[in-house]
Amino acid sequence: MERAEIRIEFVPELHVFVNARRRTGRSAVTTDGSSTLGHVVESLGVPLTEVGGLVVDGAPADTSHVPAAGEEVAVLAVARPQLLAGPPRFLLDVHLGTLARRLRLLGVDAAYESTDIGDPALAARSAAEQRVLLSRDRGLLHRRELWAGAYVYSHRPADQLRDVLSRFAPPLAPWTRCTACNGTLREADKTSVREHLEHGTERSYDVFAQCTACDQVYWRGAHHEQLSGIVTEAVAEFGDGTADGAAPSGPLHTSVAAQRRRPDGAAVGAGPA
Ligand SMILES: [Zn+2]
């Protein structure tokens, strides 16, 4: 095939991925004449999970388009919110544990492996369970097996949370999911969970919930204020009006397991680090 020179431009949202000289407008790229536009964009550093559209000489084009010499290409970012067929379910890579716990705190289905199971296994799980893989690793987001993926733009958990909530607009149901394992919580009375409680806890707190998956017990603990703040802020900005954010009446925040890890009594809960 004849090599072909095209000119390509990236919208500002995508500048984080590309070389500095491609951030100021159109720049030339020489292709091998047979590669698809999707491949060209990826080879310049942009995961296709972040591409919302391609425009070639003013008309929409597909990633399978093979660019010809002289074409002018614009690469667009994904629109927000990026709506999926159903409520989004996520899978987070090993570096995003705090984000996983914050999503769970808001009732968002967020699977997370605290050990590194490797890129192929993560991608396979994304496909098998139809989960959006969240990662800051572009190599991982290039994997073809992914069901869907999204780059997490910030390294700060607070910004990561806003990024994911604004991008996918998941329904929020605070205080309904286990922050430790992603299981759903059910209400539990003190009698039924007494065996899991230390004496001081049993005396001090009244409201309990238990994870239906891992049996972890939750109550309103020391970090209620901090977790409440995260929930209130998220619900105010991203809730649909039905989520109970400002005044959580149900289940809870501090776990037995967490308290045992901190015998000084500073129960850290299963909440955000
Ligand atoms: Zn659990």
Image (cartoon, rainbow, N blue to C red):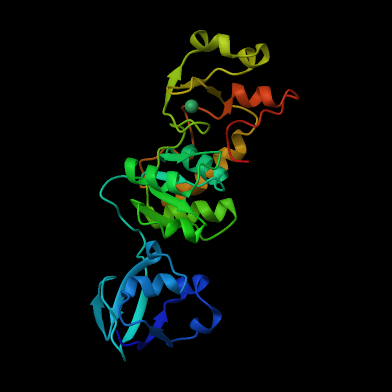
Q: Is 233 located above or below residue 249 in the figure? A: below
Query: Where does the image place residue 233, in percent across and percent down from the top left?
Result: 51, 48
Residue in the image at 51% along x and 8% along y? 191
Considering depth in this image, is 124 or 105 the residue closer to the camera? 124
Q: Quadrant of the C terminus?
A: top right
In the image, farthest residue toward the front? 1
Residue in the image at 33% along x and 46% along y? 127
In the image, farthest residue toward the right? 264
Considering depth in this image, is 140 or 218 the residue closer to the camera? 140
Residue in the image at 36% along x and 81% along y? 32
How many numbered marks are there?
0
Query: Where does the image place residue 22, in percent across and percent down from the top left?
Result: 49, 82
Which of the 4 image quarters holds residue 75? Answer: bottom left
Which of the 4 image quarters holds residue 39? Answer: bottom left
Which of the 4 image quarters holds residue 172? Answer: top left
Residue 237 visible? The answer is no
Q: Is 55 located above or below residue 192 in the figure? A: below
Query: Where does the image place residue 225, in percent across and percent down from the top left?
Result: 61, 37
Q: Quadrant of the N terminus?
A: bottom left
Residue in the image at 55% along x and 30% along y? 253
Q: Is 245 located above or below residue 199 in the figure? A: below
Considering depth in this image, is 167 or 24 the residue closer to the camera? 24
Residue 2 visible? The answer is yes
Query: Where does the image place residue 18, in percent across and percent down from the top left?
Result: 50, 75
Q: Is 192 located above or below residue 208 in the figure? A: above
| Residue 74 relative to residue 61: left or right | right
